[in-house]
Amino acid sequence: MDSTTFQKLRLESVANVRKTIRAGSYDGHTAGLAPGVLQANLTILPEEVALDFMRFCQRNPKPCPLVGVSETGDPHLPTLAANIDIRTDVPAYNVYRDGRLACETKDIKALWNDHLVAFALGCSFTFEHALIRAGIPIWHIDNNTTVPMFRTNIQTIPAGPFSGPLVVSMRAISKSQVDLAIDISRRFPLAHGAPIQVGSPETIGIADIAHPNWGNPAPMPEGMIPVFWACGVTPQVAIEGAGVPLCITHKPGHMLITDVPEEAETPVLNFVQEIG
Amino acid sequence: MDSTTFQKLRLESVANVRKTIRAGSYDGHTAGLAPGVLQANLTILPEEVALDFMRFCQRNPKPCPLVGVSETGDPHLPTLAANIDIRTDVPAYNVYRDGRLACETKDIKALWNDHLVAFALGCSFTFEHALIRAGIPIWHIDNNTTVPMFRTNIQTIPAGPFSGPLVVSMRAISKSQVDLAIDISRRFPLAHGAPIQVGSPETIGIADIAHPNWGNPAPMPEGMIPVFWACGVTPQVAIEGAGVPLCITHKPGHMLITDVPEEAETPVLNFVQEIG
């Protein structure tokens, strides 16, 4: 079902994609759906650690670009889209208890409570779309696999109980297109911005690019350079380390689709954007 | 004394400027000091409203670009400079009680306590320096007055007790340089970014540009266009409206000087910036 639904959804409007997901009729990944709008990682935490988590995001903006935060107990994110309901609008969720993955679910209506705060963090889909539009092929998308991700020897800046290593994603870019890829991704600070390392995995503690810690291996043919971007798995590792009693995230790849245009100056609807 | 000290400080390193301020030897404004590094607005609030204030900043990034947040009770901001002590490193502070200005002071050592959180917000000095470097004259700087600021009819997006109108600052830019001014300021999202209105004050509820709500009037000669940027007075108005028991801010124009380069991709020292 998912594959057929996916092909249909690719032709649908953003509102219809979210409606289908909300109805529970699609639980697949969102890569390639709703082109042109910001997709986001989701993290839901109890209010007691929400201030610390916001501080963690503020101090580590490359892996954790905060694009939206709910009121405590309110499952809506009106700055990202008028009608988002965070309990139903993500195709699949991971539920963590005491820092460990407890279960996967299609909605979190039964789990939502008055003490929870929802955080949306920008994701790499945004700059990947822009790279593809500029003629830079992205192997893991062309081959329908998950981008390879690596733990690095770079430590995030801690906040309260949150700390841990920076996680990066890797894309093979041809030598002639590396500068272009850097310039394009730099234009999207809310989607990890410019890469953090180009060409020397060992300098950031990556011994073997053929064996990622998450995702699938990707080939590195002659003439291609490994380019590393800060990755949204970083906060997930920090949350696991913090052992928070309850945390809910999107299932990787199964993102929150917003109404915010990818090229918007700020991720905030209904408020002043730059002129003209 | 201040004028002589100011001229001396203009030639000093960032570290020496901060040392002089910390010693209580300078309580003047910081415009023109420590060129090339980010200066910041300061807001100190009790932890009870810190999460709401961070949400307010996240939802209103044009007037409230958050560049640093302290741990609760910790007067340091290591992501902005290794040795900042927020109790002494701003030349002059305003102390608000229950939303009203209670007093002005040169340091807040006696006021600091274990429940306070310090927030640093980017300020217009950053893009003004860039405009001047590009040959765009800034009248209020050339004439040593305060930029004119206006209450608009645009409402901020509320968060908890924080809400209120967007405040803007106005600069007269020659017709031929308006596009350049927009392009340059857009490059500094942590310093209010691109303007929010160009040329039509009445559309944002400003009836008379000769009578600003804050700061000094500035002339608008023939051939010049009024250009409006989101302004860091916006959170101050929101805080006054919220009636928070204790709030400490910098005295307008008397900013926190950081070690972060103005052109940095993120406002975070000691962490990965973009490559090369």
Image (tube, coloured by chain):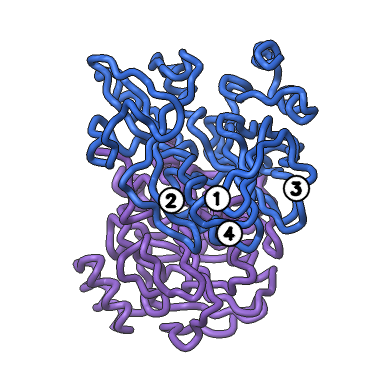
Chain colours: A purple, B blue
Q: Quadrant of the C terminus of chain B?
A: top right
Query: Label 1 amino acid?
Result: Pro
| Residue B244, horizontal then vertical, whole percent | 59, 57
Mark 3 secondary-structure assignment: loop
Above or below residue B202? Residue B49 is below
Figure quadrant of residue B92: top right
Query: Label 2 amino acid?
Result: Asn
Mark 2 secondary-structure assignment: loop
**Which chain hosts label 1?**
A
Q: Can you tell which mark lies on residue A61?
A: 1
Q: Can you tell which mark lies on residue A54?
A: 4
Query: Label 3 amino acid?
Result: Leu
- Could one spot residue A263 in this view of the protein? no
Residue at 63% x, 63% y: name it: B48
Q: Read off the residue under disc 3.
A: B111
Give the crowd class for mark 3: few <14, some 14-19, many >=20 residues within 10 Å. Answer: few
